[in-house]
Amino acid sequence: MRSIEMRKELTDEWHHEPKDFSFLTNILTKAWSGMTTGEYKRHKGLTKETLHDT
């Protein structure tokens, strides 16, 4: 539960700088999935949906 809260606080802060948000999101996605955000979306067959929709 604490990790979810910490992630929300962090991403809330990132939203102030959209360029940084996408860069950091890509780093986190690569760390847990082994794929970039774009690669992971293609893997899941997503076109317009966000990763939150999966």
Image (cartoon, rainbow, N blue to C red):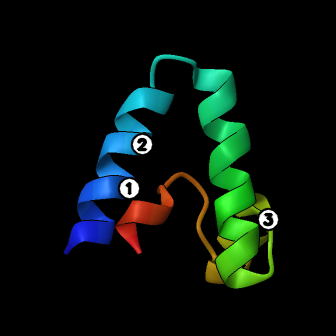
* Amino acid type at image mark 3: Thr
Q: Which mark is residue 7?
A: 1
Residue 44 visible in the picture: yes
Element under disc 1 = helix
Q: Evaluate if marks 1 and 2 touch, with contact meaning CB atoms under 8 Å apart.
A: yes
Q: Which mark is residue 50?
A: none
Q: CA distance from mark 3 to mark 2?
A: 19 Å
Per the image, the residue denoted by label 3 is 36
Residue shown at the point (58%, 23%) measured from the top left: 18
Left or right of 22? Residue 5 is left
Q: Label 3 neighbourhood size at 10 Å, few (<14), some (14-19), many (20+)?
A: some
Compared with residue 10, is residue 53 higher up or lower down, i.e. above or below?
Answer: below
Residue 42 visible in the picture: no
Which of the 4 image quadrants contains residue 28?
bottom right
Q: CA distance from mark 1 to mark 2?
A: 5 Å
Compared with residue 38, is residue 31 higher up or lower down, i.e. above or below?
Answer: below
